[in-house]
Image (spheres, rainbow, N blue to C red):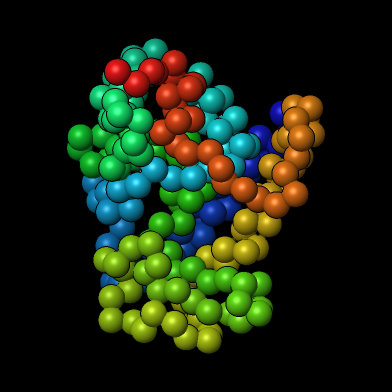
Amino acid sequence: MAAIQDYRRLLSQLDDLFTQAIDTHRSEMECKRGCSQCCHEDPAIAHVEADAMAEGIASLPSERRAALTQLVTAALPADGTPPPKCVALGVDGACQIYEIRPMVCRTWGLVKFYSKGWGGLRIPMYSRTCWLNFKGRPMRKTEGDGLISFDVDTWDAALHAIDVQNAEERGREATTQLTKTLQVAATLAGILGVERA
Ligand code: SF4
């Protein structure tokens, strides 16, 4: 599917942006393997991301799929409540679907700003998703201070265009705006055939 390829290209561009941010702002960013500060919630994702996740999991070696199934089974609350942390977070504090994690997981820790939101004001939100990064910087300024930053509106628009293309390719109704209505926990449970105990 062409849309899935476009989605993977978008992720790769995002990874490049993150690497650039880390290289430039290392002294102000705590992001590293084993830090799971960002993973204490169940991330919301778009449909194309769920489809890409299904493809990614299908291509994992069977031992890895089995371990992931075990992890998700244990992490899903039996009472149907949302999990207190992401079901893909391993006991070692590392993401167990790292190479197929969704877009939102690749933006945690970056300085974010909304180029279209709030009347078109460019308002950076320092450490919006992680209080460990950019400590001591003011939460809001009207310009980006030259920081490598993530424009939420621009990236979301690109993801939405791909989501629409993906829906068309699959004969599904496309959404009129990007609605990340799926959750990683339910998506993984569905892909792996896990049922709540
Ligand atoms: S998918 Fe991975 S990176 Fe994203 S919240 Fe879950 S464990 Fe963390």
| Above-or-below relation of 185 to 85 | above
Q: Residue at x 52, y 48 (%)?
A: 103
Disc tally is: 0
Q: Quadrant of residue 79?
A: top left
Relative depth, front residue between 43 and 58: 43
Give whichever of 147, 165 is nearer the camera. Answer: 165
Q: Is residue 106 at least partly visible in the picture?
A: yes
Quarter placement of the C terminus: top left
Q: Position of residue 172 (x, y in %)?
A: 75, 30
Residue at 79% across / 27% down in the picture?
Answer: 171
Residue at the (53%, 85%) spot, across then down: 143
Q: What residue lies at 36% left-to-right and 84% top-to-bottom? A: 138
Furthest-bottom residue in this view: 142
- Residue 170 appears left or right of 57: right
Query: Is residue 197 found left or right of 22 in the rendered image?
Result: left
Residue that extends furthest to the top in the rendered view of this protein: 62
In the displayed structure, 62 sits above or below 144; it is above
Is residue 33 left or right of 5 when viewed as pictured?
Answer: left
Picture quadrant of residue 43 = top left
